[in-house]
Image (cartoon, rainbow, N blue to C red):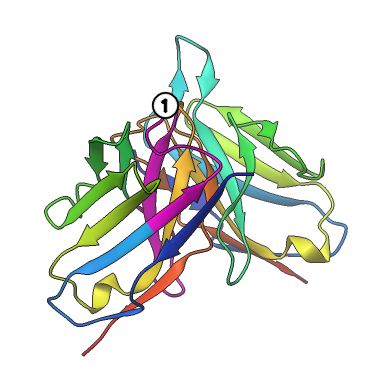
Amino acid sequence: QLQLQESGPGLVKPSETLSLTCSVSGASVSSDNYYWGWFRQPPGKGLEWIGNIYNSGNTYYSPSLKSRVTISGDTSKNQFSLKLISVTAADTAVYYCAKASGYGLTDYWGQGSLVTVSS
Amino acid sequence: IVMTQSPDSLTVSLGERATIDCKSSQSVLYNSNNKNYLAWYQQKPGQPPKLLIYWASLRESGVPDRFSGSGSGTDFTLTISSLQAEDVAVYYCQQYYSTPQEITFGGGTKVEIK
């Protein structure tokens, strides 16, 4: 049974860095059969793709966030992580990690982690 | 690829049909395998999205058969044939044609009971 679990601070100050980790069980983040990704959803709004990591090293980012985002993988812990720099209140959202198939279909999601940007 | 859903919200009586449309700004049909890279998700409050339909018309395992997807190219539809109380949720279409460089969602359709 594949499971994903987000972890990280629930409160980040403006201008600082948001950091989240996704722990994966039931599949390997180093597999070249899957993509591992991050999404977010501001309160009361729709879903937004942030970026993907593939084969532990190849990364792809949303053009609107590319200048502030880094996604990385840790195969020894079977985790992948999100860093978003210079955050503002507009980055307040529930952040989801997810797995996609080799075709790109997002088929497994974590439960989500609410991150609030506030001083 | 921009995904546009309509309507934004929908109020339907129990047992009646609900229909949600999704339009992509370019075709999500991959000619080499004749597959539409289009999925539908259901999201209830406080929960992550749940995959309902993939390849535009295939139901995910365990999804009731009152949910169906149709369409090809740029125009797609999610139909709930007989709305049940547990179907109250927000529904999103998503294109994965341009994965891994881009994944985009429609704005969502909120389905409520009349």
Q: Nearer the viewer, residue B69 or A25?
A: A25
Q: Is residue B104 magenta?
A: no
Residue A96 vs A92, above or below: the answer is above
Residue B20 visible from this viewpoint: yes
Residue B61 vs A77, above or below: the answer is above
- Which residue occupies the extreme bottom position in the image? A119
Q: Position of residue A107 (x, y in %)?
A: 55, 41
Residue A48 visible from this viewpoint: no
Q: Which residue is mark 1?
A: B27
Numbered disc 1: secondary structure? loop
Q: Quadrant of the N terminus of chain B?
A: top left
The answer to whether B67 appears left or right of B49 in the picture is: right
Residue B43: quadrant of the picture: bottom right
**Residue neighbourhood size for the residue with mark 1, other residues' Cα within 10 Å, grouped as few (<14), some (14–19), many (≥20):** some
| Amino acid at circle 1 | Ser
Q: Is residue A23 magenta?
A: yes
The magenta span reads: A22-49
Task: Tell me the residue at 52%/34% (across/down).
Answer: B38
The answer to whether B43 appears left or right of B74 in the picture is: right
Task: Tell me the residue at 58%/71% (across/down).
Answer: B46
Residue B2 vs B101, above or below: the answer is below
Q: Position of residue B37 (x, y in %)?
A: 49, 29
What is the chain letter for disc 1? B
Q: Nearer the viewer, residue A17 or B58?
A: A17
Task: Tell me the residue at 85%/64% (across/down).
Answer: B14
The answer to whether A64 appears left or right of B102 in the picture is: left
Q: Nearer the viewer, residue B39 or B19?
A: B39
Q: Position of residue B80 (x, y in %)?
A: 75, 49
- Which residue occupies the extreme right position in the image? B15
Q: Quadrant of the C terminus of chain B?
A: bottom right
Task: Tell me the residue at 20%/82% (across/down).
Answer: A13
Q: Position of residue A2 (x, y in %)?
A: 58, 44
